[in-house]
Amino acid sequence: MLFGSIEYFEREIMSFAKRKSLITLSPNQVMEIHSGIKYELMNDFICDVDLKKECINNLNLASEKLIYKYKTLL
């Protein structure tokens, strides 16, 4: 799994949820985690601007994918 890929960010979101002892994720919880990761990418991650844009795009796609997944489970 490559850093910055959609799958990478899905796993990061799920890992964060697990650390917070969340069993299932609501769309709001996914977006809270998304915001935290996005903040880190924007402010703490030093890299090329194009790579940063690609990472944020993939984070957005991963979040949308997880929101859809958990909405269908409700």
Image (spheres, helix red, strand yellow):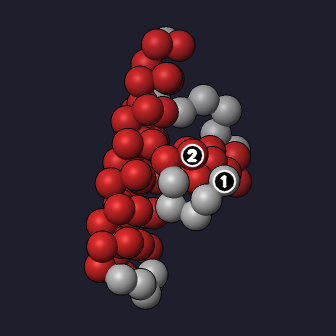
| Residue 1 - label | 1
Q: Is residue 38 left or right of residue 20?
A: left
Q: Is residue 45 left or right of residue 48?
A: right
Q: Do the residues labelled 2 and 1 touch (CB within 8 Å)?
A: yes
Q: Is residue 13 visible?
A: no
Dot 2 corresponds to which residue?
A: 7
Task: Kindly state the secondary structure of the residue where label 1 is placed.
Answer: loop
Q: Is residue 26 left or right of residue 14?
A: left
Q: Nearer the viewer, residue 30 or 21?
A: 30
| Residue 33 - label | none
The disc, 2 or 1, on the residue closer to the chain's N-terminal end is 1
Q: Can residue 24 be seen in this view?
A: yes
For the point 50% across and 23% down, the residue is 70
**Residue 60 at what x, y percent from top left?**
35, 48
Q: Is residue 53 left or right of residue 74?
A: left
**Residue 13 at what x, y percent from top left?**
56, 49
Counting other residues with Cα less than 10 Å from the Cα at mark 2, is it few (<14), some (14-19), or many (20 or more)?
Answer: some
Q: In which quarter of the image is residue 10?
A: top right
Q: What residue type is labelled 1?
A: Met
For the point 46% across and 53% down, the residue is 33
